[in-house]
Image (tube, rainbow, N blue to C red):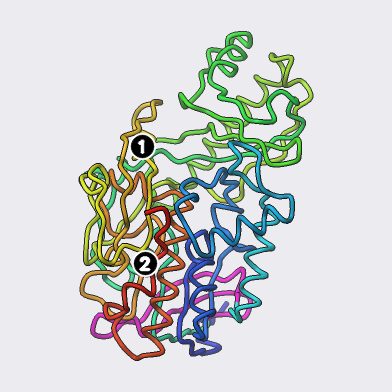
Amino acid sequence: MNVNLKVKCKYKYDVVVVGGGPSGAPAAIAAARQGAKTAVIEAQNALGGMWTGGFMNPIFSWKTKSGILEELISDLKKRNAWGGFWGDSFIFEYMKLLLEEKCIKAGVDVLYDTHYIGCECENNRVKGIYVSNIEGISYYEADVFIDATGDASLCADAGVEWQIGDDGDHTECQAMTQMFMVAGIPEKYREGLKMYDVCEAAFLKEGKGNHTPFDRPYLIPAPNSDFANVQLTHMRGYDPLKASDRTKAVMEGRQQMITVFEALKNHDEDFKDMSLVGAAPLLGVRESRRIVGEYILSENDLINGAKFSDGICTCGFGMDIHNAKATAQTVIRTKIYQIPFRCLIPKGFEGLLVAGRSISGTHLAMASYRVTGNCCAMGEAAGKAAAFASKNKCSVRDVPDELIKLIKNN
């Protein structure tokens, strides 16, 4: 049998975004709105990434953001799809729809079920990327690429320097989570529930010696429904850059999900009518590669409330560490701080930006800026900068600071 690895098609864009999640989709929308010919490459069959395929609610750190995130929340409210847990949650299918509508209106070419598989570089610039889908292998050229993969996959292939975990230990990355959805939650829990005591009581009645794998599990209701997501499973000690470890993490997460669901349904009167809808299609990986950029955001910057001339957004979420070796969650308080645009620029590279949790920062700082409200703002700033650099045939380092600021309540 012959395997045909020939490139079938070649395409040229101003801006290509790899990954259509909470940072990638806004990046594509922002670039296209600035007049750039833009494509977004997405492996799933929807935009939104962890927002949608990962069942990730609520949206943290949104109140200090303007721009596309503010638009999305306004539109979700109009569709009666915003509220629920802490008043900051949404219905996933509406988020998918809204992101698609904004991409279509802006003129973004969206490509689903399409996998990034490699890149071609010259003189520390990505010339093009290879993708695979039903049509075979295609090649995309662009003036600027935005790596919104969450794992800095494009950057790693291009040769960008990166870091991982605590002092480079892959297994010291934060615990992974398999979010899952249930239906038929009782009326009294429609505002949410911290589940630890409830789960432990059910396990005690079950008598099998099981325990809750995380000390702050939550039932997270969707707005205007009896559906809820459960943030409970925690898989530790896995290398996020090994496919075999990710596979084992998914399997362990499924086992944890079934174990706790059965315990609650069989041994807690409040949950006897609860139904298991299913696990999220995407594994919740909190931490993997972090690029080394023109600036490395540190925990001291967050603790001291650092502000920057090229600050793109304000953030206030604490350093939220889901420990790699213990069931406890550690939270370190921060002041309101800014993310500088320089953290999105890989050191020594041109025509390449990063958005999302893979930007340049320390292990502890990442534990704050990784949340999706921040990722959305990073993506929008990256998209605007990429469009400007393409249009003006200049370095991304020459983008005016005022163009990419999404500062609010500063």
Instruction: Report if residue 34 is visible in the image.
Output: yes
Give the position of the N terminus as an image quadrant. Answer: bottom right
The residue under the point 36% across, 45% down is 368
The kind of residue on which mark 2 rests is Val
Q: Which mark is residue 329?
A: none
**Left or right relative to 20: residue 346:** left
Q: Secondary structure at mark 1?
A: strand
Residue 65's place in the image compared with 156, above or below, is above
Residue nearer the viewer, 88 or 231: 88
**Left or right relative to 20: residue 297:** left
**Residue occupied by mark 1:** 321
Q: Please state the extent of the stretch shown in magenta in the rendering.
A: 110-137
The residue under the point 43% across, 75% down is 384
Report the Cα–Cα distance between label 1 and label 2. Answer: 22 Å
**Left or right relative to 368: residue 192:** right
Q: Earlier in the sequence, mark 1 or mark 2?
A: 1
Residue 124's place in the image compared with 43, above or below, is below
Residue 255's place in the image compared with 87, above or below, is above
- Residue 24 x, y percent position in the rendering: 49, 66
Q: Which mark is residue 354?
A: 2
Q: Would you say residue 310 sits in the magenta stretch? A: no
Residue 207's place in the image compared with 310, above or below, is above
Magenta span: predominant SS is: strand
The residue under the point 74% across, 25% down is 186
The kind of residue on which mark 1 rests is Ile
The residue under the point 42% across, 63% down is 406
- Residue 314 x, y percent position in the rendering: 37, 54
Question: Given the current orientation, which residue lies at the most extreme front position?
Answer: 409
Mark 1 neighbour class, 10 Å CA radius: few under 14, some 14 to 19, many 20 or more:
many
